[in-house]
């Protein structure tokens, strides 16, 4: 139900932030008091899962409300097909806009734009080129910010004198000889970044958001505030680089059995450089304190944003979502980075603050029911009273959960996907470009992973919460696997493939052949 | 392998022509000597199956080389999404064109065209509006031909004086009182249409093709010659309306057990008017002779086209495909029309004439290996030496089968789909717009149909070739069903969802993060 109270949307995303790296989610040392405060005012969804453990496809699911094999952008750098619609475009269609500060990992379908003669510098071309967002300031954080960001100029204006201050200052440090060393090399990240914390990318992006809120005043707005941290490069500005000691970090979660009984695809992944490195204790000891510090930095910056919200009176009329596109292994399961189907990567923080008085009864509660990333679009659409776009959107609004009027039958499983075509693992395994796929179905009790042409994985989450023991080939669990495999098949079957007619058009055309002058089988 | 001998493509499609209604496929009375002659010069694929038993989705699979749930046009009148590419557009991209004479059932994605500011009357808009075809003359045969066809003017010029000669003459007859009666009503189709056979739609469309071939002379061409017959309205011009007696028609194939043990969705379909009527012997007796006559008419007209091919010397350099978009129950299985997963509807004629001398050894042979409609696009692309578009195309070229160099491991199953959302059956069953789906996997031995939320169907094709006895709920076949269900799940998994990068781009981007300046997990 749309809310008379709700006029604005603040959709905050972190990149690569694990579920367990927040105070409100049980981290014993991290002091995320601002994020925790949001949890105390909203609902903390404890079982929120992404649709893919990789930035690109996960974000496209957040932005389209569709599973990765529905939207088609199955990995980083794969353009979202031009026929797919995003939250920004839905808002645009309703005379609103979705502003962007930070990262989207968006790649425009330039081949389709050429095919359809859409000029990149036309209004339409700019909208498609930005995935429906109005880019206040965009940068993805892998390489230096481009023209779509003011960060480089900002840095130069603040005395970071360089043609590429991102590279030379933000992601660099000085070693003991005063030499510049790269924060992209894990060996260097115990050093502080060459940037004052007030000028870090996390501070800058927060400034951008604060400026935007101030500028909008009482005009309605929707903003995607999308931090590029705690994603690599893990180098942090002082004091965050040294704020947490290793013994204040979560311990690494791995078991020798995981190496003794490796799934073939995981074995291939473990031959990739990042995983070879993250198997080393030295690397874990180097990265975890910095990763934890970077989360702290985000929380500190959010404190400034909360002050602006308070000052402007925005808590009374703003829906706030706080989440992440996926987690980070940090050495868990003898892996670094992400992609695979462990909860470490697939489960993310998801806090939802709903300003409507109907949500008062559930403020500060924890919600165990399953949430998927694809629920974000329908939640925002419902909050703003816009069309539900059911012919495309595969998620469901979470507002019934904040307002306590959810149906008894909520989803009892979540789904995620991986396309590992672009990874060295494919070449190691000698696979073709359409053969590198896997899907996860996860219930409260089980996690089943279907690997095309390889044995499945199965984890008993009740008895093996850490997911150390793969039961994918253990004969006694054959019937469990079969049931979960069928669930996956049904999930394939329910995906929304017919998107070119909306449900009103579908209803209007059902059983109406005769009305349209089409007679058959009439005696 | 492209052929130096092959310059032209003639892709002939009939509408609703059953596999068994050709002399070369065993019909005991039908004298399809021209089609049979083509079979004697090419390869007769005896196990060719469509991707859906309905015009629209089946044709879109023929035209895109993709399964219906990949291309998204899941039923009639559902526009093909603008991001999907068709054979016509592939040829257009290569500086060629795919001409059209007749039916396509194409619906443009006008919502997407509006969204992307594509004017319908621009060159691009016309191309998209016609599905990549260059429409010499198009009409779909349901209602009167529109401006895209010259047929109405042609009729008026030949003395059929009417604002709507299609309705008043081609699909009408005169009853015993001299009153005009409609050929859309089955009670009237024992009467001849009010049109000389030289002016029938089948003759007119053949004229169009002949004129096109003559006009092209020795310039290369590709033509989709797409007859609207023997699809309803079943009214035929003299002498075809009375050429075959009922005892020269194939007997109806149905069994009381099919009504005694009805699948719930089939039971709902059998409450629809066309099926209520086609259960009656009177209707079958009325329709079958006319349907048979209409096939004869097509064959007779093809004789004229063959003469033109001969005269122009086109047999030496033209690939010829003869097929149909699906069959027609004609009362079989207590059903009329199409849609369902019986071979009557799903199995179609598929003749392939390959002019290359490498195909000489297999001329006049029958081929039992499975063909799918989606093989048409890759066959044509290979024949013309064009890019294979593997990132999208899900079928495979049939030229290895005409030239005798096919791999030993050919496909051992075919797949089809149904979206019955638009049918009265959905309302009878009280289902929503994304809940009316079914899928078929058919091997040489078994046919398995997965109905979303309903029991499956299973037929033992070796012991029940007529598909009378549904084993979908018989306990002893549970393991057979499980195996076939898994095949279907694997088929879902292999569908091509990542279409925005071609395979060259995919290869170029595999394992190249560092080259692109993206460093992670590096010590």
Image (cartoon, coloured by chain):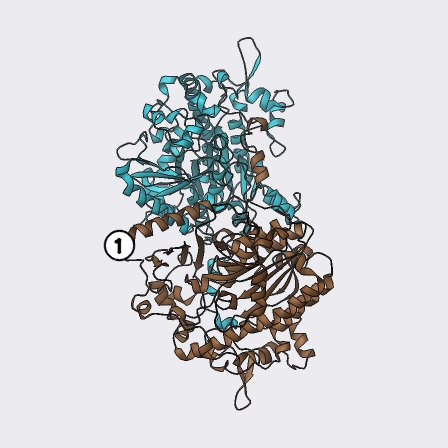
Chain colours: A cyan, B brown
In the rendering, at what x and y percent does residue B232 appear? Answer: 51, 72
Which structural element holds mark 1? helix
Q: Residue at x 32, y 65 (%)?
A: B262
- From this view, report whether residue B272 is shown above or below residue A402: below
In the picture as drawn, the residue positioned furthest to the bottom comes out as B177
Quarter assignment of residue A97: top right
Q: Which residue is drawn at 55% across and 70% down?
A: B32
In the rendering, at what x and y percent does residue A418 appear? Answer: 45, 38
Q: Nearer the viewer, residue A261 or A230?
A: A261
Quarter assignment of residue B111: bottom right
Q: How crowded is mark 1: few (under 14 residues within 10 Å), some or many (20 or more)?
A: few
Q: How many labels does the image show?
A: 1
In the rendering, at what x and y percent does residue B517 appear? Answer: 58, 26
Quarter assignment of residue A53: top left
In the rendering, at what x and y percent does residue B163 appear? Answer: 64, 79
In the picture as drawn, the residue positioned furthest to the top comes out as A177
Disc 1: host chain: B
Q: In this view, does A174 lie to the left or right of B223?
A: left
Residue B140 visible in rendering:
no
Residue A112 visible in rendering:
yes
Q: Which of B77 and A169 is in front in this view?
A: B77
Q: Is residue A228 left or right of residue A346?
A: right
Q: Nearer the viewer, residue A48 or A207?
A: A48
Q: Which of B191 and B154 is in front in this view?
A: B191
Query: For mark 1, what is the residue?
Result: B476
């Amino acid at each position: 139900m749309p809310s008379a109270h709700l006029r604005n949307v603040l959709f905050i995303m972190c990149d690569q932030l694990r579920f367990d790296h927040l105070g409100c989610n049980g981290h014993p040392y991290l002091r995320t008091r601002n994020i925790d405060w949001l949890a105390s005012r909203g609902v903390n969804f404890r079982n929120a899962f992404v649709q893919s453990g990789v930035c690109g496809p996960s974000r496209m699911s957040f932005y389209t409300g569709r599973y990765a094999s529905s939207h088609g952008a199955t990995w980083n750098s794969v353009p979202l097909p031009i026929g797919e619609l995003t939250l920004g475009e839905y808002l645009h269609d309703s005379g609103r806009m979705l502003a962007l500060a930070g990262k989207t990992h968006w790649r425009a379908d330039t081949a389709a734009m050429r095919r359809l003669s859409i000029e990149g510098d036309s209004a339409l071309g700019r909208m498609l080129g930005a995935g429906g967002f109005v880019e206040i300031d965009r940068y993805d954080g892998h390489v230096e910010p481009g023209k779509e960001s003011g960060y480089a100029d900002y840095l130069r204006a603040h005395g970071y004198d360089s043609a590429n201050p991102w590279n030379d200052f933000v992601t660099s440090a000085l070693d003991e000889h005063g030499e510049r060393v790269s924060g992209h090399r894990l060996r260097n990240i115990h050093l502080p970044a060459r940037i004052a914390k007030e000028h870090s990318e996390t501070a800058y992006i927060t400034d951008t958001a604060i400026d935007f809120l101030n500028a909008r005043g009482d005009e309605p707005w929707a903003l995607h505030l999308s931090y590029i941290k705690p994603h690599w490069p893990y180098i942090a500005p002082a004091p965050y680089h040294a704020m947490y000691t290793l013994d204040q970090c979560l311990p690494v979660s791995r078991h020798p059995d995981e190496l003794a009984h490796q799934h073939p695809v995981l074995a291939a992944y473990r031959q990739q450089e990042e995983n070879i490195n993250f198997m080393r204790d030295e690397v874990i000891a180097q990265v975890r304190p910095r990763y934890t510090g970077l989360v702290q930095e985000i929380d500190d910056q959010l404190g400034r944003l909360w002050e602006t919200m308070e000052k402007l009176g925005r808590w009374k009329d703003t829906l706030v979502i706080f989440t992440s596109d996926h987690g980070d292994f940090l050495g868990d399961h003898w892996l670094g980075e992400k992609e695979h189907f462990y909860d470490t990567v697939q489960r993310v923080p998801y806090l939802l603050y709903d300003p409507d008085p109907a949500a008062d009864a559930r403020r500060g509660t924890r919600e165990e029911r399953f949430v998927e990333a694809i629920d974000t679009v329908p939640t925002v659409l419902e909050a703003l009273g816009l069309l539900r776009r059911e012919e495309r959107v595969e998620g469901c609004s979470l507002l019934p959960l904040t307002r306590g009027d959810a149906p008894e039958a909520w989803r009892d499983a979540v789904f995620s996907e991986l396309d590992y075509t672009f990874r060295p693992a494919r070449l190691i395994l000698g696979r073709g470009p359409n053969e590198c796929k896997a899907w996860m179905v996860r219930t409260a009790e089980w996690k089943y992973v279907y690997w095309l042409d390889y044995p499945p994985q199965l984890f008993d989450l009740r008895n093996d919460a850490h997911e150390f023991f793969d039961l994918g080939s253990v004969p006694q669990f054959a019937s469990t696997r079969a049931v979960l495999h069928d669930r996956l098949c049904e999930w394939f079957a329910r995906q929304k493939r017919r998107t070119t007619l909306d449900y009103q058009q579908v209803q209007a055309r059902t059983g109406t052949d005769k009305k349209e002058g089409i007679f058959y089988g009439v005696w």
